[in-house]
Image: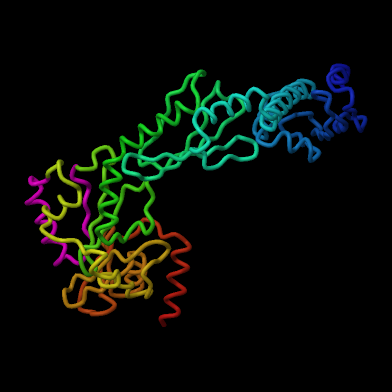
Amino acid sequence: MAGSGALLRQCPLLLPQNREGTVYEGFVTVQDRDFHIRILLPSDFQLKNARIHCSWRLKKVLHGYHQIVKQRLQHCSDLVSFMVELKTILEAALKNTQELHEPPPPEYYSYLVRDIETLGWNKVVYVDTGLNTIKLKGEDSCGRQHLITLKLNAKYPAEPPDCCVDFPVEFAISWIPQSSLVDIYNQFLAALESLKEFWNAMDEIDEKTWVLEPENPTRSATMRRIAIGNNVSINLEVDPRHPTMLPECYFLGADHVVNPLRTKLNNNMHLWDPDITLLQNLKEVLETDFPSRAVLEKTDFTMDCGICYAYRLDGAIPDQVCGDSRCGQPFHQACLFEWLQGLPSSRQSFNVIFGECPYCNKCILDALVPALIEPEVNNALSQRGRERI
């Protein structure tokens, strides 16, 4: 048992359990704490094939360090050098654990309370019991309410807090150790004003049109799918930095309805005026009025999927329509793909699948083949298909 003296000096409580020196059991001591450990060595004493059994307490401390321990086993030449490495890893793990659970110093609380008092308690919406998470409210010049969530660590104000906001763009704060909550709040208000025109444009769309998706848009949402008519809609992707410029547009609906709209958009694109609102530009360029909430009900221009008989399938709404003007039945893309895939007469070319409409039969439909249909969608389709049969 060469090196037993060196091992005894490093780990006096780790003792051999057999004459061959292939089994060791006892305790490894770090920061005046003893951790039970059992080490099983192969007959050739190669550490890369050794097995280590730890107490639950040692496993908890080494959580997240398993790969490092394995690497040390692979590279250490003998048990003594490995135990030295293991004690070093334990030192680091214990230090990180203490920092994670160690309460902030008294100066942290006094500094933070002073910051909040300077800012004003009337701007605070929520503070957790440990004063680690703070929610502040702010109002833009149009009267919209916004929230910012701050997550502070024990090194505040030397290190900035993590900021969480419902913005369509990244919110990066400028911070120095002398900064305070007031500085963050002022940057928050400045960011609100920079996004005011974007939110004005989106609010006008939400108030004056029927928005099909998203169902409950957040302040960070840059996409709107707006109803134009019966099973015809336009998908908009608005640039939050340039909200009055022409957005990305994508029409959804039967070709005989969508193609004239595409033609109008292409022909009238030069009429787009950045000095008027996004919605007004869309009306003039497309030469159409969007259905109003005040005049029509949502059911006037939305229909359930003709296959699963539901409007929403795992959040998605029907976005494929039969191209025959006498039919015009809408379908979920996933439902239509599943249906056409099961028809013997269907054929597929690249990412397009062709087949007969489940309703008018004579129409040939094509649907973009989904790259991946989630398992829960498949389950929902299968269940509804059995119900339909």
| 51 sits to left or right of 269 | right
The quarter of the picture where residue 93 lies is top right
Q: Quadrant of the C terminus?
A: bottom left
Q: Position of residue 66 (x, y in %)?
A: 67, 35
| 300 and 87: which is toward the camera | 300
| 35 sits to left or right of 325 | right
Q: Residue shown at 23%/68% (left/top)?
A: 295
Q: Position of residue 30 (x, y in %)?
A: 80, 24
| 378 sits to left or right of 291 | right
Task: Specify whether residue 269 is painted magenta.
Answer: yes
Q: Quadrant of the N terminus?
A: top right
Outermost residue toward the bottom? 389
Magenta span main SS: helix
Q: Which residues are magenta?
A: 245-272
Q: Residue shown at 45%/72% (left/top)?
A: 382
What colouring does the structure picture have?
A: rainbow
Q: Position of residue 287 (x, y in %)?
A: 10, 58
The quarter of the picture where residue 311 lies is bottom left
Q: How many marks?
A: 0
| 293 and 303: which is toward the camera | 293
Q: Position of residue 54 (x, y in %)?
A: 79, 37
Q: Residue shown at 26%/64% (left/top)?
A: 293
Q: Residue shown at 34%/64% (left/top)?
A: 317
Q: Is residue 54 above or below residue 159?
A: below
The quarter of the picture where residue 47 lies is top right
